[in-house]
Image (tube, rainbow, N blue to C red):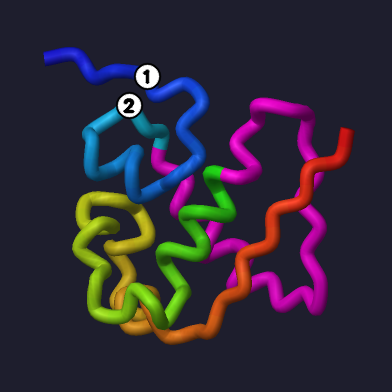
Amino acid sequence: MARTVGIGIQSFEKLIENHYFYIDKTNFIKKWWENGDDVTLITRPRRFGKTLNMSMLERFLSIEYSGQGEIFEGLAIWNDEKYRKLQGTCPVIFCWIAVY
């Protein structure tokens, strides 16, 4: 059965739970975490998945989702025990600012 492309879906949880087509970008979490920058600015043109990536990052790190890592099973980040232990351990403030 072919998967539907979820155009305009900005919620990582909704995308995964509804089995929409998704290209695994969870390695972004690992690269970002290991980079050690004090500040990260993510700039890309419109429709490049910035909000979806931030939603994924929030869903992975936030203490609100502690112990709910099963949504990441089968994705690249879940293959590393270090990151399975990291899931749901950080306070997260999600701010989304649209600039036109």
Label 1 element class? loop
25 horizontally vs 18: left or right: right
Q: Nearer the viewer, residue 52 or 80?
A: 52
For disc 2, the neighbor class at 10 Å (few under 14, some 14 to 19, many from 20) is some
Q: Is residue 21 above or below residue 97?
A: above
Question: Where on the picture, by quarter, is residue 18?
Answer: top left
Residue situated in front as seen by the camera: 32 or 20: 20
Look at 37% across and 33% down and name the residue there: 22
User: Residue 100 appears in which quarter of the rendering?
Assistant: top right
Residue identifier under label 1: 5
Q: Decide whether the magenta segment is chiefly helix, strand or loop.
A: loop
Q: Quadrant of residue 68?
A: bottom left
Residue 88: give x, y in percent of width and height. Answer: 38, 79
The spot of residue 53 in percent (x, y) is 55, 48
Circle 2/circle 1 CB separation < 8 Å:
yes
Badge 2 is on which residue? 21
- Which of the marked residues, 2 or 1, is nearer the chain's N terminus? 1
The three-letter amino acid code for the residue at tag 1 is: Val
Range shown magenta: 24-51
21 within the magenta span: no
The amino acid marked with disc number 2 is: Phe
* Residue 35 magenta-highlighted: yes
Q: Residue furthest right?
A: 100
Q: Which mark is residue 92?
A: none
Q: Position of residue 24 (x, y in %)?
A: 40, 41
Residue 32 x/y as whole percent: 63, 65
Which residue sits at x=50%, y=64%? 58
Q: Residue at x 51, y 61 (%)?
A: 57
Q: Residue furthest top?
A: 2
